[in-house]
Image (cartoon, grey):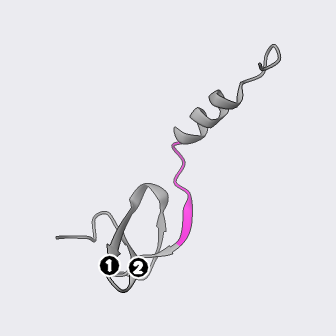
């Protein structure tokens, strides 16, 4: 149990998941070649290649 005035582990984890900051990742968009923010990342699994990453607005079916 958390001490008085401090958040529990669950509360800290929940706040971290709801973080609204756009964190820049090391992943690079396959279409434009720029690094991708976590909120804009769209991972695609490709057979025999693995994962390819796009910006959400750059990927079209």
Q: Quadrant of residue 14?
A: top right
**Contact, mark 1 vs mark 2 (Cβ under 8 Å):** yes
Residue to which mark 2 is pinned: 50
Is 55 positioned to the left or the right of 5 in the image?
left
Is 35 placed above or below 6 here?
Answer: below
In the rendering, at what x and y percent does residue 36 appear?
A: 46, 68
Is 2 placed above or below 37 here?
Answer: above
**Residue situated in front as seen by the camera: 60 or 33:** 60
In the rendering, at what x and y percent does residue 20 appear?
A: 51, 43
Query: How many angstroms separate mark 1 from mark 2 (CA)?
Result: 5 Å
Instruction: Say if the magenta span includes residue 20.
Output: yes
Is 9 positioned to the left or the right of 32 in the image?
right
The 10 Å Cα crowd at callout 1, few under 14, some 14 to 19, many 20 or more, is few
Which span is picked out in magenta? 19-26
Instruction: Say if the magenta span includes residue 15.
Output: no
Is 7 positioned to the left or the right of 20 in the image?
right
Give the dominant element type of the magenta stretch: helix, strand or loop: loop
In the rendering, at what x and y percent does residue 45 appear?
A: 34, 72
Is label 1 in a helix, a strand or a loop? Answer: strand
In the rendering, at what x and y percent does residue 24 appear?
A: 55, 63
User: Who's the residue at 52% across and 54% down the image?
Assistant: 22
Q: Which mark is residue 38?
A: none
Q: Quadrant of the N terminus?
A: top right
Is label 2 in a helix, a strand or a loop? Answer: strand
Q: Quadrant of residue 26?
A: bottom right
Q: Quadrant of the C terminus?
A: bottom left
Is 61 placed above or below 13 here?
Answer: below
- Residue that lies at the very extreme toward the right in this rendered image: 3
- Residue that lies at the very extreme toward the top in this rendered image: 4
**Residue situated in front as seen by the camera: 40 or 6:** 6
Residue to which mark 1 is pinned: 46
């Amino acid at each position: 149990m958390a001490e008085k005035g401090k958040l529990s582990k669950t509360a800290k984890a929940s706040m971290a998941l709801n973080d609204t900051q756009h964190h820049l990742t090391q992943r690079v968009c396959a279409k434009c070649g720029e690094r991708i923010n976590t909120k804009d990342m769209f991972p695609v699994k490709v057979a025999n290649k693995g994962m390819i990453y796009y910006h959400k607005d750059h990927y079209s079916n």
